[in-house]
Image (tube, rainbow, N blue to C red):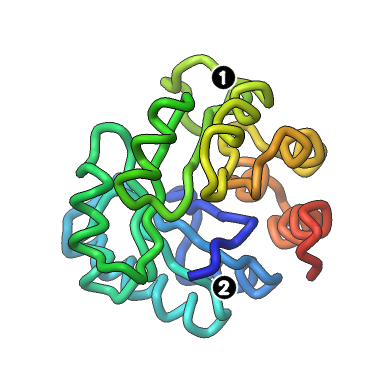
């Protein structure tokens, strides 16, 4: 499955049923549903709604952390962090065609995730981020370069990414970027997505 160059991650302060579709319709190739609040039933309902919206906008849906939720709503894949299920287990559960992303911070972790079946790597945080204040120190574009040189699968830079910072990340070897705050904190989130797609060379 082709890995999109722009991964838009959900911000739970927004309203899924009202805010998501207009932004995805700008041409977002991959949407990551990250849910930290609510019961499993509430997360399932949110996942089912996200799947319906993604189907209408031709967007691939990736669920953060939860294989069970991804399978329940028919998502295209799962993204896992260091404290979640191992990549090899996720790959086995999701099957060979699913998108499986793994969060990494260094070349050793990147090589291990790739060997275990990751489709792509979410590398970062690259810059300081207000979205998750408890993150470890930023790795910078230099960290992206080290990871990109170590593996052959796509590297998606995450953490403090803005349209202005995309060129240096691509120059460092990133295949694409993942964003949260730069889109959802803006009064015109669709316009930011369009700018990101343009600077990534995807177009709108």
**Pointer 1 local density, CA inside 10 Å: few below 14, some 14–19, many at least 20:** some
Q: At x 41% / y 71%, what residue is drawn?
A: 50
Q: At x 44% / y 67%, what residue is drawn?
A: 61
Res. 203 visible in picture: yes
Q: Which residue is mark 2?
A: 21
Whether residue 109 is situated above or below residue 54 in the rendered picture: above
Whether residue 28 is situated above or below residue 103 in the rendered picture: below
- Left or right for 167, reference 98: right
Q: Which residue is mark 1?
A: 138
Please name whichever residue, 26 or 14, is drawn nearer the observer in this view of the structure.
26
Residue 57, given in percent of the width and then of the height, sits at: 57, 80
Residue 14, given in percent of the width and then of the height, sits at: 50, 54
Could you tell me if the residues under marks 2 and 1 are in contact, i.e. CB atoms within 8 Å? no
Residue 184, given in percent of the width and then of the height, sits at: 61, 49
Q: Label 1: state its secondary structure.
A: loop
Which of the numbered marks, if any, corresponds to residue 58?
Answer: none
Count the marks. 2
Residue 39, given in percent of the width and then of the height, sits at: 18, 54
């Amino acid at each position: 499955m082709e890995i999109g160059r722009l991964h838009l991650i959900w911000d739970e302060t927004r309203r899924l049923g009202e805010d998501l579709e207009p932004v995805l319709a700008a041409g977002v190739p991959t949407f990551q549903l990250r849910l930290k609040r609510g019961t499993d039933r509430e997360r399932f309902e949110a996942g089912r709604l996200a799947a319906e919206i993604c189907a209408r906008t031709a967007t691939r849906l990736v669920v953060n952390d939860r294989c069970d939720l991804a399978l329940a709503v028919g998502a295209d894949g799962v993204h896992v962090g260091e404290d979640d299920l191992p990549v090899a287990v996720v790959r086995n559960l999701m099957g060979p065609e699913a998108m499986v992303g793994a969060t990494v911070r260094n070349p050793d972790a990147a090589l291990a995730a790739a060997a275990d079946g990751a489709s792509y790597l979410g590398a970062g945080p690259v810059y300081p981020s207000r979205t998750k204040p408890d993150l470890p120190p930023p790795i910078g574009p230099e960290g992206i370069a080290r990871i990109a040189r170590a593996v052959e699968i796509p590297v998606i830079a995450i953490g403090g990414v803005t349209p202005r910072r995309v060129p240096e990340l691509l120059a460092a070897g990133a295949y694409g970027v993942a964003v949260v705050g730069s889109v959802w904190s803006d009064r015109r989130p669709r316009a930011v997505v369009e700018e990101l797609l343009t600077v990534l060379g995807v177009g709108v």
